[in-house]
Amino acid sequence: MRKLIVVLAILMFAGVAGAGQDVVPAGKPLKLVLARQSTVAMVDVMKDFSDKCPNVTLTTNPKNSNYMLYAGGWSGEYRFMVIAKGGDTLYATKTVMLSNAVKDVCHFLNTRP
């Protein structure tokens, strides 16, 4: 009986220890350049990308980027748009929180073939 309680306590502790962690989607390394018309600070966007999507980095060189990101809006209404080379718009999202906009873009980029 005593061994059973110890085993259950260990299993329960192991389940609780990993419960609060975000699962970061694995993906190929990608580079985004922030559009000049973006109104959200690059530092804020970069912070959330490093937290939510570590395979995506921001660059200042458009020639080295895979996509362009327009990040507009303000607190309570963020609008992000992913643009392919050549100017085709591929994805857009509108969210209340900056971190959710970054999470949406991250999910889109990591699910593209």
Image (spheres, rainbow, N blue to C red):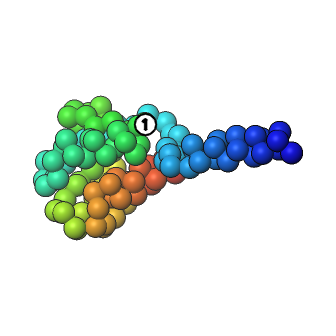
Secondary structure found at label 1: loop
Residue 50 x/y as whole percent: 35, 39
Residues packed near mark 1 inside 10 Å, few (<14), some (14 to 19) or many (20 plus): some
Q: Is residue 3 left or right of residue 11?
A: right
For the image, the number of numbered tags is: 1
| Lateral position of residue 20 relative to residue 45, left or right | right
> Looking at the image, which residue is at 63% across and 43% down?
13
Seen as rendered, the residue at the extreme front is 2
Closer-to-camera residue (33/41): 41
Name the residue located 25 percent from the left edge and 47 percent from the top edge. 45
Residue pointed to by mark 1: 55
Give, as a three-letter code, the residue at label 1. Asn
Which residue occupies the foreground of this view, 1 or 9?
1
Which residue occupies 57% across, 44% down?
18
- The answer to whether residue 85 shows anywhere in this view is no
Q: Position of residue 52 (x, y in %)?
A: 40, 45
Describe residue 92's horizontal placement relative to residue 9 as left or right: left
The answer to whether residue 23 shows anywhere in this view is: yes
- Return the residue found at the far right: 1
Name the spot of residue 29 as percent of width and height, x first: 44, 34
Quadrant of image for the N terminus: top right
- Residue 32 point in image, percent of width and height: 30, 41
Q: Residue at x 28, y 67 (%)?
A: 96
